[in-house]
């Protein structure tokens, strides 16, 4: 019998099919159900831990954004300082005169941030000098000096204070403006004498603050809570923030991120994560019986699938004797696909007979061909990526050197306030420059980056040159290679505007025409000679390898052009020109492709 099986492909494959398919299906079904019931809870723990950590990160980032917004008052501190100083002195006329500029500035901060709901400005005595919400602004002379949050804000001496959900005491309870808000408050410090002048408060609606969390899809009977440092419930997915002391102690009694607690309603699986800097807790709980219900569902699914697979296996085995020529047909079909260039084709033949050897040899041949093709393709891709990394690394050090030189110049003049502001702006620039995110960004984002850079340069050159913009709104969403504008603007300032004695002008223009859009960076400083103009435009037409060997002193401009060509093609890139009145300009040609939002 065994000898007959070894010689007959039909009997061999029939026997192997029955033994190799039916028995493993039975074993796999049994083991799968056993393992799934044991690992279901662990999988839930892992998934919930990751979700909780992500929620914690989202909440912390939202609080940090509010904290950064509270620093915006120092961008126009003169108007704020004037109002606070006039109020402190009791001079009504000065207070009224300074109220307009200060209120306009605060209202612009409020309207410029969709996530903010209201902003308040208070004197050192707790008098509410200004309050404005999204519905409008008003003067409110009520007092908050005795409120605990106000005293704690003053005690922090300029450091921010996070105020948990509350209602404003100086807003009418019946007013639609008096909504539950979270707030960031901080004392305003006069940097000239380190004297506290007043307090600014930025509010965000609780519903806005937890919007991302409230959109989360929770399991059946799963409860989610955010509990503040005071023990009050800030948010709950059940629609109520009321939590009894017993329930709260029950949820907080466990150790670590994941634990079980026993309640009157049964066993609960609890996950607890903490916002370390704020003392908040993110807590999720689900009844253990809910996981058991899922286990029963898995059992039914496994049993049904097992019976179905066994039935299919026996039905296939009956017809298997009629399919002895199937391996040959598979091999022939795969050969035809290979002849048409399909290198993904494979022949699946088991055993030790001739068909198996042919199939194994065929599969090995196709795999080798596919591997060789993939290796050559990857080599080309890695070469392009290496060129891009080298080009980008040569730009950032050049910018760092020039910016630090500007800051050093201010420090030498003992202008510490402006140098401090420049350092903060420089930090924002580096955050953008060193971010290893998308290589293609929206032009609006790149333009915002270059505006920060020009602010830093303005601190160095003062009013020596002015900057103008002419930007079509329709190009703001188009893509551009990140960090493209900075080297070009830097060249215009250093080589064009810095050497001249007269006042200069730098203009940045962006226009869309058909399938392309164009960016022009023009300066009226030192002009470019005909020889230098031709030399640079010739280099811009050369390949990246030839440029690298040329060791050009305009490497930044060449790098930008090379990066644009790598991403968009040779028809795009840079071109230098000289205007009719002698100004020098750089024209950037890019495809008008809007980035997906």
Image: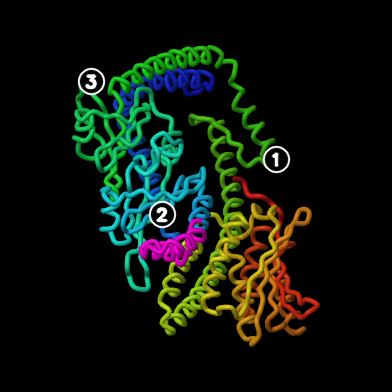
Name above or below for residue 187 compared with residue 182. below
Q: Which of the two marks, 2 or 3, is nearer to us in this view?
A: 2
Q: Which of the two marks, 2 or 1, is nearer to us in this view?
A: 2
Q: Is residue 91 magenta?
A: yes
* Tag of residue 266: 3
Is disc 3 placed on a helix, strand or loop?
A: strand
Q: Nearer the viewer, residue 558 or 501?
A: 501
Q: Quadrant of residue 55?
A: top left
Q: CA distance from mark 2 to mark 1?
A: 82 Å
Give x and y (percent) for residue 350: 50, 30
User: Does 58 sit left or right of 289 as displayed?
Assistant: right
Name above or below for residue 424 compared with residue 19. below
Report the span colored magenta: 74-103
Residue at x 74% of width, y 62% of height: 571
Q: CA distance from mark 2 to mark 3?
A: 54 Å
Is disc 2 placed on a helix, strand or loop?
A: strand
Residue at x 61% of width, y 59% of height: 380
> Which residue position holds label 1?
339
Q: Residues within 10 Å of mark 3 (few under 14, many from 20)?
A: few
Give x and y (percent) for residue 493: 61, 78
> Which residue position holds label 2?
129
Q: Is residue 71 magenta?
A: no
User: Does 281 sit left or right of 78 as displayed?
Assistant: left
User: Does 593 sit left or right of 84 as displayed?
Assistant: right
Residue 408 seen in the current view: yes
Q: Nearer the viewer, residue 430 or 372?
A: 430
């Amino acid at each position: 019998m065994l000898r007959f099986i070894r010689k007959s492909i039909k009997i061999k494959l029939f026997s192997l099919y029955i033994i190799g398919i039916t028995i493993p299906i039975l074993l796999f079904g049994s083991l799968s159900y056993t393992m799934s019931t044991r690992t279901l809870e662990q999988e839930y723990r892992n998934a919930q831990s990751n979700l909780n950590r992500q929620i914690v990160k989202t909440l912390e980032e939202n609080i940090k954004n509010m904290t950064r917004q509270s620093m915006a008052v120092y961008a126009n501190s003169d108007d704020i300082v004037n109002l606070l100083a006039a109020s402190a002195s009791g001079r009504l006329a000065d207070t009224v005169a300074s109220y307009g500029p200060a209120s306009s500035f605060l209202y612009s901060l409020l309207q410029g941030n969709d996530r903010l709901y209201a902003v308040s400005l208070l004197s050192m005595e707790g008098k509410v000098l200004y309050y404005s919400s999204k519905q409008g602004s008003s003067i409110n002379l009520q007092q908050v000096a005795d409120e605990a949050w106000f005293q704690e804000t003053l005690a922090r001496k300029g450091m921010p204070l996070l105020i948990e959900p509350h209602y404003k005491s100086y807003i009418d309870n019946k007013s639609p403006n008096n909504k539950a808000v979270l707030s960031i408050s901080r004392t305003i410090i006069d940097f000239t004498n380190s004297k506290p002048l007043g307090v600014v408060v930025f509010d965000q609606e609780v519903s806005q603050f937890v919007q991302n969390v409230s959109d989360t899809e929770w399991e059946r009977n799963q409860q989610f809570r955010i509990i503040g440092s005071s023990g009050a419930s800030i948010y709950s997915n059940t629609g109520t923030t009321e939590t009894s002391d017993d329930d709260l102690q029950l949820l907080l009694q466990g150790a670590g991120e994941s634990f079980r607690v026993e309640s009157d309603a049964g066993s609960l699986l609890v996950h607890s994560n903490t916002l370390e800097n704020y003392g908040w807790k993110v807590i999720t709980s689900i009844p253990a019986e809910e996981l058991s219900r899922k286990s029963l569902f898995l059992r039914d699914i496994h049993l049904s699938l097992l019976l179905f697979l066994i039935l299919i296996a026996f039905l296939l085995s009956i017809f298997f004797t009629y399919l002895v020529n199937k391996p040959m047909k598979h091999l022939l079909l795969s050969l035809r696909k290979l002849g048409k260039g399909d290198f993904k084709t494979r022949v699946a033949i088991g055993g030790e007979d001739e068909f198996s050897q042919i199939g194994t040899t065929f599969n090995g041949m196709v795999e080798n061909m596919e591997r060789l093709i993939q290796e050559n393709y990857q080599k080309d891709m890695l070469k392009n990526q290496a060129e891009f990394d080298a080009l980008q690394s040569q730009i950032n050090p050049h910018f760092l050197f020039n910016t630090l030189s500007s800051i050093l110049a201010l420090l030498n003049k003992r202008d510490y306030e402006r140098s401090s502001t420049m350092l903060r702006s420089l930090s924002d620039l580096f955050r953008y420059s060193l971010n290893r995110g998308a290589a293609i960004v929206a032009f609006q984002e790149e333009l915002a980056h270059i505006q920060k850079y020009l602010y830093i340069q303005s601190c160095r050159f003062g009013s020596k040159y002015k900057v103008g913009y002419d930007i079509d709104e329709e190009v703001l969403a188009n893509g551009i290679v990140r960090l493209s504008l900075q080297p070009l603007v830097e060249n215009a300032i250093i080589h064009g505007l810095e050497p001249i004695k007269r006042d200069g002008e730098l203009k940045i223009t962006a226009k869309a025409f058909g399938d392309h859009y164009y960016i022009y960076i023009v300066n009226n400083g030192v002009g470019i000679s005909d020889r230098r103009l031709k030399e640079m435009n010739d280099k811009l037409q050369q390949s990246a390898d030839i440029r690298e060997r040329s060791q050009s002193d305009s490497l930044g401009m060449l790098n930008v052009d090379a990066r644009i060509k790598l991403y968009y093609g040779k028809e795009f890139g840079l071109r230098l020109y000289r205007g009719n009145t002698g100004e020098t300009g750089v024209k950037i040609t890019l495809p008008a492709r809007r980035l997906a939002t």
